């Protein structure tokens, strides 16, 4: 830690977010608010079937409707029907079928785009969809992953002659030997159900050719304006230097906007073709089927251990549902979890196999945590089951196997090197906050009295890998991009500061947090710092926001660029003050001659000198700015202990989360209030997977949970106030000591909830509860354990 | 999504409303709060030609004391109903049920009369109206008529209100019995999987009479008449639990994503016992 980061600066203070005033006053600039003269609105005819041949498609009827400017099927669109790219071919022999923006001859998921209408109003465009003639010949839908892999199954993509997308193996150590030595081998199957990201602002895209130039500007509600620009250039053939992508205010993403969607291709190409702005905004109904989904894995796990609770080895076999097509990083999501199954535990061997499977469902891709929640769920569940199997207290089993604080840095069986951690400290703090012993006593009383409401304690001691990512590691995993981040810091002539970042916030509070980092180094008040982001015209370099990377990686770039700016300013100030640069100290934004505070020059004054350039030292260029592009040395590894007290009404199956305590170690905190907010939101989202959310399909591939009336997401009324705490073990591989917090809560909380429910019911013979643990599911699980009705 | 184009007519009297419905023909629909209708329009599940807005008809707003009963204008919002002193004093069950409808934003817009006329089997207020023996004033081209609760709810989303008619108000005989509405749902804003509306007349620790309405156990809200009969004379938790075992008798529970029929029936029995115990204080 450098002196510049000590207290007395804005760093580490829970200051209020700069972003909030305009959010709270309704002054947000959502993409759908953008109104350009001459705009035509696009509406999409989507497939009502999961798998069918398009036997007829005639868009000519739509062209006759009032206000309609154009209408296209795949045939009419021709070369402009670009393909959605996948940038993560995880194996050499992965099957990567084409994914045209408009379906060609065949539809493969409900919501597939079949045709588009462009009209002078959104209403006219929607109305005209009814005038498109289309007919389908229904084909058998592939909905079950295991059935999909059997010979004779219907095929999602005939041309690849299989529904298996890839098989990825990572054997670490000799699992067979561990298994042979084990006293206990416990095998379980878990289902990590399909989730729908359901961010608040549906997707929206506007593309506008800029009349006098060749430039086309695309505004999109996206997490990845920089990546999108590259991909749009590759897919549309429009020169990259003519494309500007702007992500205006973006209302949430959770990974669902870490994507290049077919609608973005269509809107861009059609704006170019028609020579006028084109706009499309999805409805919530479209969002449920056409925005990528998350999770959806069948997880077989086997753990080998001694009878006194020493873990020897772990074997994980996954079926991962790709859906109908591969989107940007669909195949790689399970691999982000691959490294995390061994989690915080020491073991000799680990064997991982994942088979990606095509089905006639919406494609899956990143969703908050992306692979790591799936891993954490399974390992934390099997640890509890192993504890029950060998009759050990579940926390004691964890303590027996986890990496102790004096063993860091520690290279895990999966090959990651965790730089730091202190699981003992976080756990001790969480147990104290929770009243663990008191709740165990209450649990015993309720069991003894046969109370219809039973109490369970759920534990999750998690770690995760975030701060995506070292570029060389991404390369080794065949990911076709880097993981660096960029920052330019400019001191303007009037002393104001611009921080230009390549991260792309969509609710996180980067404007505030990045200002705090720059302020702490430059000595300039937070309110004098403007953070410029999410516009490739104003912030040209970046890798955007996902994978809890923005602070862990982007924060380093802000620190480095700010420090470089101070060094350039120091040379100029020394020249002005007629001293040696090494004679200057930089205190609260002012250069002072050591030992003579009367001789000083503030950073703003230096910026003005750099602007006028009347009197700069030889070899120093005018203007005061500096930039840094940083590739992280490694991932970062937040960890923590989450505890849930679950009340289960055994008569109805209804579950009540009575108390939730979490202690997270996310390293150094730039703004503890923002950290706490991220933890609250993340925990809520993980609880939602455990209790409420789950995308359900029928055998024909129809999404049954296609509206928010059926796809349940919790509100504040459904959750208690969480008791949050932190420990601070700074990362040693990240110069700010930060780790990342965006996904931690989601990763940690799901197994804590389910472990709590199972713990409440274990004496009844219950050993697992499927997610989401709806009242009906819990009740039927109890009935089955009792040997009653299924 | 965007609804299909429609005409909008705002009326200020019942007669104007009936005339507007008549001139609008078969596809004319009444709107007041719009909390059920607008989503249907936006999903294009209905494509009415005319919407007749009855939210501004004085006679349909507010609650009045009619001596032995109270009368509630059909366009009174849920929020207005649940917080009305007359409702809280004389028809507490209705206030209790209304308070569980959706969320505060919807309760400020949506109307209780609208919910009754909409007759969603999963809606909360029909069961309360049944248990409270409400009666409904319906106006149409040939004048006004009054329909008792037992004859009001006919089928899924179907009531005694004809396509050319309008629900003006509903009346509830004043009731000072113990009451409770128990809603079993997965989230606070979700529809009831099962709801139980109970009013119980307890004298000296013994149940003299009970009326129970069930939500979402049939195509319409229904009375649990077997339970009502079995509750007479009940004086203990065990008595109530035994009577509640009949809660699913004669119901026609359906299966959906959140509950299969057998689970709904089980819930009806458990929740009925709990609601009656809460209403009776036993």
Image: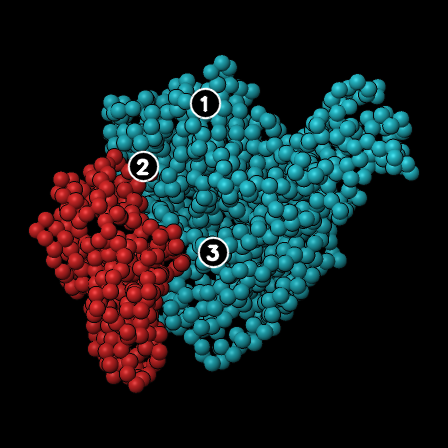
Chain colours: A cyan, B red
Q: Looking at the image, which residue sits at the far left?
A: B142
The chain carrying label 3 is A
Which residue occupies 55% across, 62% down?
A: A660
**Relative to residue A55, is residue A364 drawn left or right?**
right
The secondary structure type at the circle numbered 2 is loop
Seen from this angle, which residue lies furthest right? A595
Identify the mark nearer the N-term, 1 or 3.
Answer: 1
Q: Chain of mark 2?
A: B
Residue for badge 1: A208
Query: Considering depth in this image, is A87 or B247 the residue closer to the camera?
Result: B247
User: What x and y, as percent, mark residue A146?
Assistant: 41, 49
Q: Are marks 2 and 3 on the same chain?
A: no
Residue A364 visible to an observer of this rendering: no
Q: Quadrant of the N terminus of chain A?
A: top right
Residue at the far top in the pictured view: A212
Identity of the residue drawn at 66% across and 35% down: A529
Tell me the residue that label 3 is attached to.
A716
- Residue carrying label 2: B2
Chain letter of mark 1 equals A
Tell me, yes or no, whether the two marked residues, 2 and 3, touch with CB atoms within 8 Å: no
Which residue is rendered at x = 21% and y = 68% of the image?
A: B67
Instruction: Report the number of discs.
Output: 3
Contact check, label 1 and label 3, Cβ < 8 Å? no
Mark 1–mark 3 distance (CA, rounded to whole Å): 39 Å
Local secondary structure at mark 3: helix
Q: Is residue A446 in view from this perspective? A: yes
Q: How far apart, in angstroms, are the residues tagged by discs 1 and 2? A: 24 Å
């Amino acid at each position: 830690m450098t002196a510049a980061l000590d207290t007395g600066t804005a760093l580490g203070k829970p200051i209020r977010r700069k972003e909030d005033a305009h959010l709270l006053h309704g002054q947000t600039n959502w993409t759908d608010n953008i109104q350009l003269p001459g705009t035509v609105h696009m509406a999409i005819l989507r497939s009502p079937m999961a798998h069918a041949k398009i036997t007829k498609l005639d868009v000519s009827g739509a062209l006759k409707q009032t206000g309609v400017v154009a209408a296209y099927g795949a045939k009419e669109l021709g070369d402009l029907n670009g393909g959605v790219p996948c940038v993560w071919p995880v194996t050499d022999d992965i099957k990567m079928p084409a994914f045209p923006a408009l379906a060609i001859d065949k539809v493969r998921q409900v919501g597939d785009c079949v045709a588009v209408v462009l009209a002078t109003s959104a209403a006219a465009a929607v109305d005209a969809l009814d005038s498109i003639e289309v007919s389908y010949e229904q084909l058998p839908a592939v909905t079950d992953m295991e059935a999909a892999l059997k010979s004779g199954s219907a095929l999602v993509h005939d041309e690849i002659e299989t529904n298996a997308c890839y098989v990825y193996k990572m054997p670490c150590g000799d699992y067979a030997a561990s298994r042979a030595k084990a006293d206990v081998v416990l095998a379980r199957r878990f289902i990590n159900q399909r989730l729908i990201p359901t961010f608040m602002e549906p997707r929206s895209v506007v593309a506008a050719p800029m009349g006098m130039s060749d430039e086309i500007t695309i505004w999109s509600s996206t997490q990845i304006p920089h990546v999108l620009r590259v991909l749009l250039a590759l897919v549309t053939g429009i020169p990259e230097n003519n494309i500007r992508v702007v992500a205006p205010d973006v209302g949430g993403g959770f990974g669902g906007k870490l994507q290049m969607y077919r609608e973005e291709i269509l809107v861009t190409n059609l704006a170019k073709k028609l020579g006028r702005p084109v706009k499309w905004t999805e409805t919530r109904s479209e969002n449920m089927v056409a925005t990528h989904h998350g999770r959806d894995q069948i997880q077989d796990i086997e753990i080998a251990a001694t009878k006194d609770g020493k873990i020897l080895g772990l074997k994980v076999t996954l079926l991962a549902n790709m859906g109908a097509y591969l989107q940007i990083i669909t195949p790689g999501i399970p691999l982000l979890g691959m490294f995390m199954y061994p989690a915080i535990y020491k073991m000799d061997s680990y064997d991982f196999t994942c088979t990606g499977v095509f089905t006639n469902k919406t494609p899956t891709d990143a969703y908050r945590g992306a692979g790591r929640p799936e891993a954490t769920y399974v390992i934390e569940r099997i640890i509890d089951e192993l504890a029950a199997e060998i009759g050990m207290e579940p926390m004691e089993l964890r303590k027996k196997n986890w990496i102790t604080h004096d063993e860091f840095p520690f290279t895990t069986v999966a090959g990651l090197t965790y730089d730091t951690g202190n699981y003992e400290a976080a756990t001790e703090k969480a147990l104290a906050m929770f009243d663990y012993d008191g709740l165990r006593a209450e649990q015993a009383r309720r069991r003894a009295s046969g109370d219809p409401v039973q109490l369970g304690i759920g534990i999750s001691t998690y770690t995760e890998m975030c701060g995506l990512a070292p570029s060389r590691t991404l390369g080794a995993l065949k990911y076709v991009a880097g993981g660096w981040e960029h920052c330019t810091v400019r001191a303007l002539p009037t002393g104001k500061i611009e921080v230009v970042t390549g991260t792309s916030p969509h609710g996180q509070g980067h404007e505030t947090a990045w200002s705090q980092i720059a302020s702490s180094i430059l000595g300039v008040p937070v309110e004098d710092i403007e953070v410029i982001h999410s516009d490739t015209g104003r912030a040209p370099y970046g890798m955007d926001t996902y994978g809890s990377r923005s602070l862990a990686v982007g924060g380093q770039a802000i620190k480095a660029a700010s420090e470089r700016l101070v060094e350039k300013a120091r040379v100029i100030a020394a020249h002005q003050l007629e001293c040696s640069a090494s004679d200057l100290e930089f205190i609260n934004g002012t250069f002072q001659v050591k030992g003579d505070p009367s001789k000083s020059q503030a950073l703003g004054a230096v910026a003005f000198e750099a602007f006028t350039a009347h009197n700069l030292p030889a070899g120093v260029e005018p203007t005061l700015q500096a930039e840094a592009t940083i590739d992280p040395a490694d991932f970062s590894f937040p960890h923590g202990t989450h505890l849930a007290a679950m009340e289960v009404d055994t008569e109805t199956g209804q579950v009540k989360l009575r108390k939730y305590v979490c202690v997270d170690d996310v390293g150094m905190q730039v703004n503890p209030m923002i950290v706490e907010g991220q933890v609250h939101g993340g925990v809520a989202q993980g609880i939602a997977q455990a209790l409420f959310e789950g995308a359900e399909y029928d055998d024909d591939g129809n999404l049954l949970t296609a509206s928010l009336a059926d796809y349940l997401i919790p509100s504040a009324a459904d959750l208690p106030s969480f008791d949050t705490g932190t420990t601070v073990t700074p990362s040693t591989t990240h110069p700010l000591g930060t780790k990342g917090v965006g996904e931690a809560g989601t990763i940690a909380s799901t197994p804590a909830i389910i472990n709590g429910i199972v713990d409440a019911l274990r004496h009844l013979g219950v050993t697992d509860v499927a997610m989401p643990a709806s009242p009906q599911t819990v009740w039927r699980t109890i009935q089955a354990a009792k040997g009653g009705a299924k | 999504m965007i609804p299909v184009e429609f005409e909008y007519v705002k009326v200020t009297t019942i007669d104007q409303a009936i005339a507007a419905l008549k001139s609008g023909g078969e596809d004319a629909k009444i709107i007041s709060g719009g909390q059920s209708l607008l989503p249907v329009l936006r999903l294009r599940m209905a494509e009415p030609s005319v919407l007749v807005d009855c939210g501004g008809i004085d006679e349909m707003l507010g609650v009045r004391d009619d001596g032995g009963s109270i009368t509630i204008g059909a366009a009174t919002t849920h929020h207005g109903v649940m917080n009305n002193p007359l409702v809280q004093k004389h028809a507490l069950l209705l206030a209790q049920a209304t308070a569980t409808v959706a969320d505060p934003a919807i309760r400020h817009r949506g109307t209780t009369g609208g919910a009754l006329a909409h007759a969603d089997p999963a809606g909360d207020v029909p069961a309360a109206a049944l248990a409270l023996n409400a009666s409904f004033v319906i106006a149409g081209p040939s004048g006004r008529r009054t329909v008792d609760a037992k004859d009001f709810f006919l089928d899924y989303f179907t009531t005694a209100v004809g396509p050319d008619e309008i629900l003006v108000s509903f009346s509830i005989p004043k009731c000072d019995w113990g009451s409770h509405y128990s809603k079993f749902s997965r989230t606070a804003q979700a529809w009831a999987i099962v709801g139980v509306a109970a009013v119980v007349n307890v004298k000296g620790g013994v149940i003299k009479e009970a009326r129970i309405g069930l939500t979402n156990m049939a195509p319409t809200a229904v009375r649990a008449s077997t339970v009502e009969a079995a509750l007479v004379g009940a004086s203990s938790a065990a008595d109530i639990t035994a009577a509640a075992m009949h809660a699913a008798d004669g119901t026609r529970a359906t299966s959906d994503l959140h509950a299969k029929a057998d689970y709904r029936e089980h819930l009806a029995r458990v929740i009925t016992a709990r609601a009656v115990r809460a209403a009776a204080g036993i």
